[in-house]
Image (tube, helix red, strand yellow):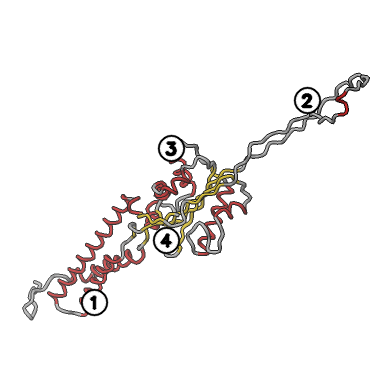
Amino acid sequence: MVNSILPTGKPRFHMNFFWKNKFVFWNLVALIFIKAVFSYSGLQFASITGGTPIFAKEEIVSQTNAFREFLGLGDLKENPVLDQAASQKLQNMITNQYFAHTSPTGISPWHWIEVNNYGYIYAGENLAIGFVTAKDTVDAWENSPSHRANLANSNFKEIGVAVAPATIQGNEGFLVVQLFGTPKPTKPAVAVIKPSPSPAPPKATPVKSPLASLKTTPTSSPLTPSPVLLASVQPAVKNVATETPVSVTVAALTPKLAKVSKTLNTTLIVYSLLVFLASLVFLVFTGARKELVIRTAASLSMVILAVAVPVFQISRAALIL
């Protein structure tokens, strides 16, 4: 029979199996692994759960056109030149660490369109960073009057988009550059009409009249081609949504993912608290052994870590510009 009374009179708990298999220890290791290795932001968590490393630019185009169709507007055609211009703007923002329509060195958003020889009569730009999905990004633009004006502008006919993960001045997430444009119309060729030869009129004997001495202004022949009148081309109109970044709470746009985040973090906090309480009980009833003291202290640190560091921070704010 196993003695259940210690020499000091304290009851002995049958914890040999528990401690021999180091249940608490390995659970603490697992918790540290979860909190330290998987302390992802919302976009990283979404990438893992979605199975894709990044949402594609085509999704931005699709969501934009879905919104325009809802408004009864025509779809925007994706233009590879605008795609390239958007990609160059995106890379410039990452390299020079700024989130703005105009770079710190004064480069305007239209620079990237113009260096790619895209002649336009209308152009526009929307920017965003920190959103989890393409739908969240476009929804945020829709809810901002200035960005919505670009999405719903009937003058725009083409679109170009670039998307990439980035961290700019502490803002982490998918960086999105959306360009709008309407190319200049191709000038039609002007046909030159040559007058057909006509028979020479018979010579008539000139008759002098009192008016013969007056100078007359020759009139154009009916066979002379009239000038071709072309519609005047409107000057290039440029539009950016706003010059001040607008903060948007991601959780408000992704309530389901926010709920999963809250549930998961609450579960880890409760679990780590129970492990700490179990370690504390063992410490009280079995004595202040060095091993127990270390494990209890580690359990308490895990409680603090579980509270302080969420597995993923879906409640953080994203930016649109």
Q: Are the residues flagged by discs 4 and 1 in contact, CB closer than 8 Å?
A: no
Q: Earlier in the sequence, mark 4 or mark 2?
A: 4
**Amino acid type, mark 1:** Ile
Q: CA distance from mark 4 to mark 1?
A: 36 Å
Quote the CA–CA distance across marks 3 and 1. 64 Å
Q: Nearer the viewer, mark 4 or mark 2?
A: 2
- Is residue 293 found left or right of 253 in the rendered image? left
Question: Distance from label 4 to label 2 (Cα)?
Answer: 71 Å
Q: Provide the residue designation for mark 3.
A: 71
Q: Nearer the viewer, mark 3 or mark 4?
A: 3
Residue 172, which numbered label? Answer: 4
Q: Label 2 belongs to which residue? A: 222
Q: Residues within 10 Å of mark 4 (few under 14, many from 20)?
A: many
Q: CA distance from mark 1 to mark 2?
A: 108 Å
Q: Estimate the spatial distance between the alpha carbons at disc 3 and disc 4, rounded to whole Å.
A: 32 Å
Name the mark on residue 10.
none
Quickly name the residue at label 1.
294
Say whether disc 1 or disc 2 marks the residue closer to the N-terminus.
Answer: 2
- Looking at the image, is 199 positioned above or below residue 118? above
Quarter residue 321 falls in: bottom left
Mark 2 / mark 3, whichever is N-terminal = 3
Q: Say what secondary structure mark 2 lies in.
A: loop
Viewer-proximal residue among 9 and 79: 79
Q: Quadrant of residue 280?
A: bottom left
Labels 3 and 4: the sequence-earlier one? 3
Horizontal and vertical percent position of residue 148: 43, 46
Callout 1: 10 Å neighbours few (<14), some, many (20+)?
Answer: few
Mark 3 nearby-residue class (10 Å; few <14, some 14–19, many ≥20)? few
Q: Nearer the viewer, residue 53 or 188?
A: 188
Q: Amino acid at mark 2?
A: Pro
